[in-house]
Image: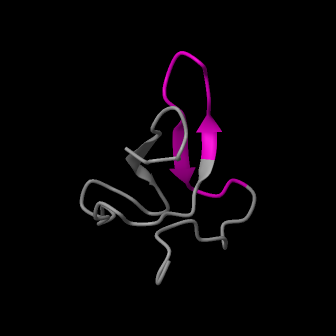
């Protein structure tokens, strides 16, 4: 769950990171700041987020350091 500072939290799946597999999962701690994008929003379900860039594979969407 990700706090968007809004009416509801968002969902960020473990496989929504570049190169994520069953063996290679991201290690995020509660309170981590993540640079990601919204991939789905609906008034009936929680927003879904992703850290995978669709336009530029060199763009790294992930945990921000010193944020």
Q: Residue furthest bottom?
A: 66
What residue appears at the point 33 percent right and 56 percent down from the top-left corner?
A: 21
What residue appears at the point 45 percent right and 38 percent down from the top-left corner?
A: 9
Image coloring type: one colour
Q: Is residue 29 left or right of residue 7?
A: left
What residue appears at the point 47 percent right and 39 percent down from the top-left corner?
A: 10
Establish if 61 lies above or below 37. below
Residue 55 lies, in percent from the top left, at 75, 57
Q: Assess whether residue 42 is covered by the magenta stretch.
A: yes
Q: Quadrant of residue 20?
A: bottom left
Span shown in magenta: 38-54
Q: Nearer the viewer, residue 30 or 27?
A: 30
Q: Quadrant of residue 43?
A: top right
What residue appears at the point 45 percent right and 47 percent down from the top-left corner?
A: 3
Q: Is residue 45 left or right of residue 24?
A: right
Q: Residue furthest right?
A: 55
Residue 28 lies, in percent from the top left, at 32, 64
Q: Is residue 41 left or right of residue 26?
A: right
How many numbered badges does the structure rendering display? 0
Q: Assess whether residue 2 is covered by the magenta stretch.
A: no
Quadrant of the image containing the N terminus: top left
Residue 23 lies, in percent from the top left, at 24, 61
Residue 63 lies, in percent from the top left, at 46, 70
Q: Residue furthest left?
A: 23
């Amino acid at each position: 769950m990700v706090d968007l500072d809004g009416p509801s939290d968002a969902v960020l799946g473990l496989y929504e990171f570049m190169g994520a597999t069953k063996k290679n999962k991201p290690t995020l701690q509660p309170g981590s700041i993540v640079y990601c994008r919204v991939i789905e929003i609906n008034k009936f379900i929680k927003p879904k987020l992703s850290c995978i860039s669709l336009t530029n594979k060199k763009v790294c969407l992930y945990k921000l350091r010193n944020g």
